[in-house]
Amino acid sequence: MSSCVDILKEMKATPEEIKWMQQQMKAGTGDDELADRLIEEIKLKRFRDKNNDLSEKNTNQFLDKLKNVSTKIKKPYNAIFKFLVGDTSGITSRSLARAQARAGFFSAKLRMPNRDIKAKLNDKGFVHDLVTEMDMFDGKPKTKNKLAFELAEAITEYQKRQVGELNSFGGGVLWRDDYITKQWHDAYRMLKVDKDVWVNDVMKALDYDTTKDRIRQIILSKGLKWDEKKFDMKKYLRSAYTAMTAKSTNKGLLLDSLHLKRTLKFKDADSFINYNKSYGHDNIAHAIFENMTMVDNHISFGEAFGFGFRKKIVPDPVNLSKHQDALAEAKLTGDNNLILEAENALESIKWKEVNPTDELQRVMHELHQTKRITGSQYRRLRGALSQVTGDSYQLGNPTLAKMVTGFQFWEYITKLGKATLSSINDLWTGAVILHYQGVKPGRAYLGLINHILKKATRNISTGERDVLLRQLNVGVEGIFETYSRNYINNPAMGTMNKLTDVMFDYNLLNWWTNSAREGAAKMMSMHVADNLAHSFDKLPTKFKSLLEAYDLNAKDWDILRKVGAFDETKFNKSGSKKNKFFTSDHFFETVTEQKPDGTFKVKSEYAKAGLSGDDVRRIEQSINRYYIMESRLAVPEAGAADRAWMFGEHARGSLPESTLRLFFQFRTHQVKMIRGLMPRMYEMGTPSLAHIMPAIGLGYVSASLKNMVAGKEPMAYDDPQTLRRSLEQSGFLGFLADFVGGQFGNYKHDMDEAIAGSAYKTITSWTDLGHELVKGNKDAVDVYNHLRHQVPFANLFYTEAAVNYFIHYNIMETFRPGYKKRLEARARGSNADYLIKPSSIWGG
């Protein structure tokens, strides 16, 4: 052993590395194998030490900032909340911007319309080929599917880039060539079967030898002895089942996830896909992209917090003595395993894990105890932190969470058929955001309407789509990830989720949302390009403040001015040179050049101007965040800050969280308007009043279209209720406006329903029906009347009238003769007569 120690000393090995080698020899590792692993393990340890140092540096910077906030800032709540989930530069907005930029990148790479990309990613044959190509990707095609190979190549390179970015903040993640995506194990589905059933199922899918070797390496790396004869794969998998179905540690799901080792290796693409059908994600293509979103979250977490670090400490004397005694007892037994375990336990108490999440929680608790923040602020900060760490997705009560999510999905596919007609109001909200930035209202409305019309008539060229719109990184909702972002804000799997996504395709809400955001971002891009003619000090005040909120300063603006904009002729030969644009891709491509190894360097002319590689990435990300987050306010959608505000710290599936989730059902849009849009209008002052009449007008159009698709006349202009309904549909009435409700046709709501919400109405209506059926006051036709509103896709804006006229009215007429005439009389009395009288179809 002494000769090995001498060799290590010649290699300038550290005392810790020498100790590791001695432990390996004690564990019984053979000389030949030890020689093969020695240099590799030393390199690996140095890699981890380097990452620990990087993480320590980032974490200490965060702790310094945290100390400053907790001791010197008058309003620590605002500072911490903004840091965690702020819309402009919060951790969650940085993560979202990364994810959206990646979606824009892959959309441009595939050179397809959104609908074709979605079709490919839902094509089982294509997904199988993609997984086959990605498994041990070596740059050579394994299938005859050229597109699958190109996408596999792009994904692999992007994943390597993510690993590099993670490690730049101290993530300590190694790249593995057999990596396809992090295996997602659905704890809910795993718990539905017996542990041994899962073990047997996963055993059939595993590459036994490779998985066994990985387990062996993990055991040896801990300094424990490997006993080939005693190894039991099923025993190991049983313990893995327990670990994977347990709740998160206090590190937070992101850190837990980052520290998990990728141990299981599946035989082939079929085994990988089939396992996921039972216990993971039923669409591996979506799983790949969703996992890259999780890695984006890791990166943003590390950028802000670091990933924590270990530091040497002086152990408590009592604890030290206890562990020293345990080691002495182990040595008396002569059992190497017991000795190694005791040595490791003694070593562990000499180190402390510094976890940034723990430190932030401690500071928030102290602020609450010293009454520097209120109880509600404390709960919201805890909720905001859970949005950052990922613990907001941790299930408190899986059964209740599943029931609530299932109920909500059912509500979406049965109630939101006409939601796009309400979304017409995105035109005025988008115009408000553009006006706030400095775009004149007339130009804002004209630009938004022009883009929507061009999209509707398919007059957007492939050049404009790929060179401009894709580079704005908006308008790519729901392509690469199946969960719906419009009204539900948490990932969920299963048939109901797919149906919800299909609903948003069928009712054109996905199309409208993407198109409206594209239009808003396009106008913002033109506005940035136009303002490059001015110095930073000469910019409109609100626009300049907004840029600063997105971490763009005067020096950065000078660089952007040096880069300059591009005009329409870049993607349209017959376009106008007067129409100029600016995107993050244009900035990056102008100031950098690619190196042979795939990295980049700053061009000399920009380097001389003081632009560094870190500056390039920061500015690129700030431009992305500006377009992405502002377009999400232009077409309002609740974000992490709003979820923290709505649900606080409550775990998914807990009774308080479930109650709040149902209360805010169909209201996340209004929450975003109240928390994000209204303050902007207040800040604008009198000029914001210019949008009241367009909002009322669009509200009138929205409500009238809902009337018309139900077969009724547009709202009467002289009806006193018209103004109220127009305001309601515009979103101006806040929570009391059922913004996407009113799907039942009569649009009449009781006050308790208006206050408690759509879910309350659904639940109480069924409860009342059951009560009245028992009393004999209701009959079969009342049951039918309730059930007809629970038919998926039946109330789409282009199917509702057909269902009513050819099915519903006739059934009701059969049950209750004279029904159609009474229906028409009521409509005349409410100034909403039918365009086509129900009695004219098959009589009445």
Image (tube, helix red, strand yellow):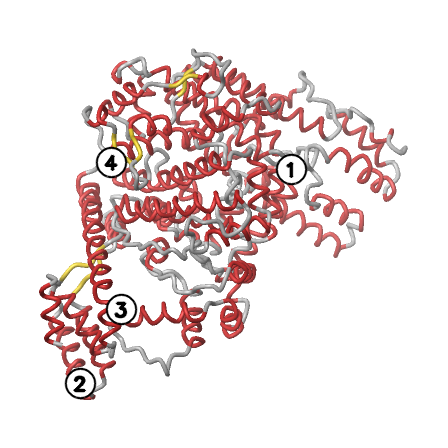
Q: CA distance from mark 3 to mark 2?
A: 24 Å
Q: Mark 3 highlights which residue?
A: 221
Q: Position of residue 416 (x, y in %)?
A: 62, 38
**Image-based side of 124 in relation to 630, left or right:** right
Q: Amino acid at mark 4?
A: Asp
Report whether residue 293 is seen: yes
Q: Position of residue 666 (x, y in %)?
A: 55, 39
Q: CA distance from mark 3 to mark 4?
A: 35 Å
Counting the numbered discs, the total is 4
Task: Categorize mark 3 by other alpha carbons within 10 Å: few (<14), some (14-19), many (20+).
Answer: some
Which mark is first along the chain, 4 or 2? 2
Q: CA distance from mark 2 to mark 4?
A: 54 Å
Task: Categorize mark 2 by other alpha carbons within 10 Å: few (<14), some (14-19), many (20+).
Answer: some
Q: Quick one: SS at disc 2?
A: helix
Give me the disc on residue 55: none
- Which quadrant of the structure image shows residue 820? top right
Q: Amino acid at mark 2?
A: Glu
Q: CA distance from mark 4 to mark 1?
A: 44 Å
Q: Mark 2 highlights which residue?
A: 329
Give me the disc on residue 506: 1
Q: Quick one: SS at disc 1?
A: helix
Q: Amino acid at mark 3?
A: Ser
Give me the disc on residue 614: 4
**Image-based side of 354 in relation to 679, left or right:** left
Which mark is first along the chain, 4 or 3? 3
